[in-house]
Image (tube, grey):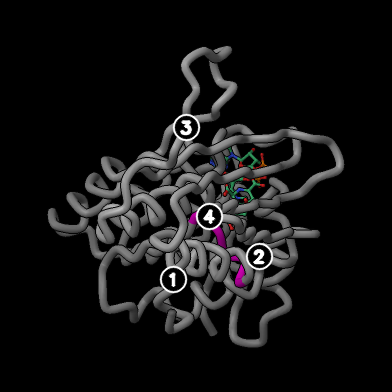
Amino acid sequence: MIKVGVLGARGRMGAEVCRAVEGADDMELVATVDQGDALDALETAEVVVDFTHPDVVMDNLRWCVEHGLHAVVGTTGFDPSRLDTVRSWQAAGAKGNVLIAPNFGIGAVLMMHFARKAAPFFESVEVVELHHPNKADAPSGTAFRTAELIGAARAEAGVGPSPDATTSELPGARGADVDGVRVHAVRLSGLIAHQEVLLGGHGETFTIRHDAMNRESFMPGVLLGVRRVAELPDRLTVGIESLLDL
Ligand SMILES: NC(=O)C1=CN([C@@H]2O[C@H](COP(=O)(O)OP(=O)(O)OC[C@H]3O[C@@H](n4cnc5c(N)ncnc54)[C@H](O)[C@@H]3O)[C@@H](O)[C@H]2O)C=CC1
Ligand SMILES: O=C(O)C1=N[C@H](C(=O)O)C[C@H](O)C1
């Protein structure tokens, strides 16, 4: 049995993770921690799952790896500098492995994979993410990562910037620029988590869309991460693509 602790256990995702772990035959939920609770309760765990907030996740994660616990992190906000900080803790002797995924949904991971593959073949690309209005961060971690992957694939293939004749705009009208890719964020009651990658070429467009209809949809990916994190070849793994052999 894998002993699992959950950080952010009273939140939307954390509560869903607690249910999923309790329903898994090979896992035992040994600790549930939320804001204001002492982290010491997690010491009985082997793997800690974090779905909290970008402002607190680094302190949580540092505590986990320095206590030798493996961490599966769904909380967003991991830019390259944060990832370097995690690597520095591990280089300094922190024993826990870390798996950070901006999205644990299998369809969302495939969307990112296909977007990266398609990116060099179209001169134009933009990302539109749509989420529930309680979301703290914009753009979403998934959209940020998608844009990074697209930007890298286009740079590697020698594709120039997407054509755009805009010379006058209201601030924000053209979205955020992430590695040369425009990213637009919609916040709307009734939504959970959705994303479209829009690609355009000469006389054709190609749209890749993913819709998460509920938070249960993220659980197969989270449980896969919990099962595999202790034995991953890299101390820090970003995304579950490699766990799906993508
Ligand atoms: N990677 C993925 O597949 C997914 C990632 N997310 C991300 O997960 C994060 C959480 O999302 P939600 O569950 O919707 O948010 P939420 O606001 O419903 O839950 C966050 C929970 O963390 C708790 N919390 C805050 N500070 C804490 C601390 N220092 N220690 C322990 N608990 C603390 C809050 O009290 C709350 O219960 C966000 O960054 C979101 O973008 C959300 C869905 C899927
Ligand atoms: O906050 C959410 O809800 C989600 N957050 C993640 C993100 O920022 O990409 C994953 C998914 O989009 C749901």
Q: Residues within 10 Å of mark 1 (few under 14, many from 20)?
A: many
The stretch drawn in magenta includes residue 138: no
Residue under pointer 3: 164
Q: Residues within 10 Å of mark 3 (few under 14, many from 20)?
A: few
Q: CA distance from mark 3 to mark 1?
A: 50 Å
SS at circle 3: loop
The stretch drawn in magenta includes residue 104: yes
* The residue carrying mark 3 has its beta carbon less than 8 Å from ligand 2: no
The residue shown at (47%, 65%) is: 118
Q: Amino acid at mark 2?
A: Phe
Q: Nearer the viewer, residue 242 or 30?
A: 242
x and y, in percent, of residue 88 in the image: 17, 50
Q: Nearer the viewer, mark 4 or mark 2?
A: 4
Q: CA distance from mark 4 to mark 2?
A: 36 Å
Q: CA distance from mark 3 to mark 4?
A: 15 Å
Specify the segment rendered in magenta: 102-106
Magenta portion: prevailing SS class: loop
The reply to whether the C-beta atoms of the residues labelled 4 and 2 are less than 8 Å apart is no
Report the residue that reaches farthest toward the left. 92
Q: Nearer the viewer, mark 4 or mark 1?
A: 4
Q: Earlier in the sequence, mark 3 or mark 4?
A: 3
* The residue carrying mark 2 has its beta carbon less than 8 Å from ligand 1: yes
